[in-house]
Image (cartoon, rainbow, N blue to C red):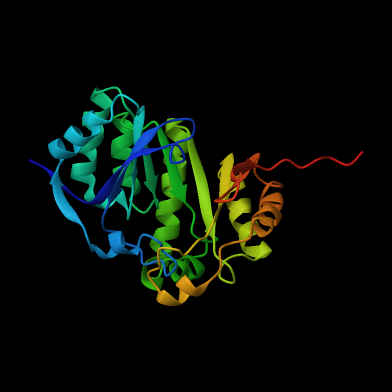
Amino acid sequence: MVEIKIGGIKEASTIDYPGEMVSVIFFCQCPFRCPFCQNWSLVQGNDCDSVPVQEIMKQLDKYRKYITGICITGGEPTVQIDGLFELLSETHNRGLLNKLDTNGFYPERIKKLLSSKLLNYVAIDIKAPFSPERYGKVIGNISIGEKAVKNVSETLQLLLQFGIPFETRTTIIPTFNDQLQEIEQIAKRLNELHVSRYILQQFRASGGTLDKSFAKLPATKPEVLRELAKLAKKYISDVRIRTIEAGEEKIEIKEAR
């Protein structure tokens, strides 16, 4: 029986899958070490339990009256591809919608899930401009920067190839990646790849961060996100921001008359 290392299950959420009520399952482990990571305990494997897939399904069955699907997040769920595949197969067979949050580092594993039609929606994190050195620095491992850029690009191309609904997203950290030039570089590259949805997320360090110095940073100001989003909007048709204060906000630019 396949077991999965998880940090827990959130019974119900309306913000983790657009338009759906879902249970959220937190997978442990990740190949990245982003210093600003807010799920640092999952990345490090702290407070994680090995749980059989069937036990997870028993929990989900209890919530079936009010959930329409699940969101698998982490950590990086595709690290545990065997358990992930079995779990998504079980939920798919029960008629639940499957959403995956991923950093895109394992395109072949994503392809396996897509080919088996086990995913209904994907959110892929774009950590930085597609420069090996910069990407490597942001993910906390310079040595895999080049591989990360290559693999994330490949994952994006797979998502487009399979025609699955997906979003790209970047968490904006004050003083770290909130420069206009940085977001413009990301947006230009996403435009070249024909990506149509990009979301800028608010950083909040209320639960601590992998690098403790980032926990001292303030939450990203909504006005900063809007400014960056308006720039990204020049390249991408659907740009949004997400904040605690206002939830999700679609950016519209009024044309001058």
Tell me what residue is drawn at x 84 percent, y 40 percent. Answer: 255
Q: Is residue 166 above or below residue 8?
A: above
Q: Is residue 194 visible?
A: no
Q: Is residue 2 visible?
A: yes
Seen from this angle, which residue lies furthest left? 1
226 relative to 149 in the view: left or right = right
- Please identify the quarter of the rendering in which residue 44 is found: bottom left
Q: Is residue 256 above or below residue 58?
A: below
Seen from this angle, which residue lies furthest bottom? 213
**Residue 229 horizontal/vertical position (percent):** 66, 51
175 relative to 25 in the view: left or right = right
Give the quarter of the figure containing the C terminus. Answer: top right
- Please identify the quarter of the rendering in which residue 202 is found: bottom right
2 relative to 136 in the view: left or right = left
Give the quarter of the figure containing the N terminus. Answer: top left
Marks counted in the figure total: 0
Tell me what residue is drawn at x 46 percent, y 44 percent. Answer: 156
**Residue 198 horizontal/vertical position (percent):** 57, 45
- Please identify the quarter of the rendering in which residue 176 is found: bottom right
Which one is nearer the viewer's eye here, 208 or 127? Answer: 208
**Residue 52 horizontal/vertical position (percent):** 12, 43
Which one is nearer the viewer's eye here, 250 or 58? Answer: 58
218 relative to 117 in the view: left or right = right
**Residue 9 horizontal/vertical position (percent):** 27, 45
Tell me what residue is drawn at x 60 percent, y 46 percent. Answer: 246
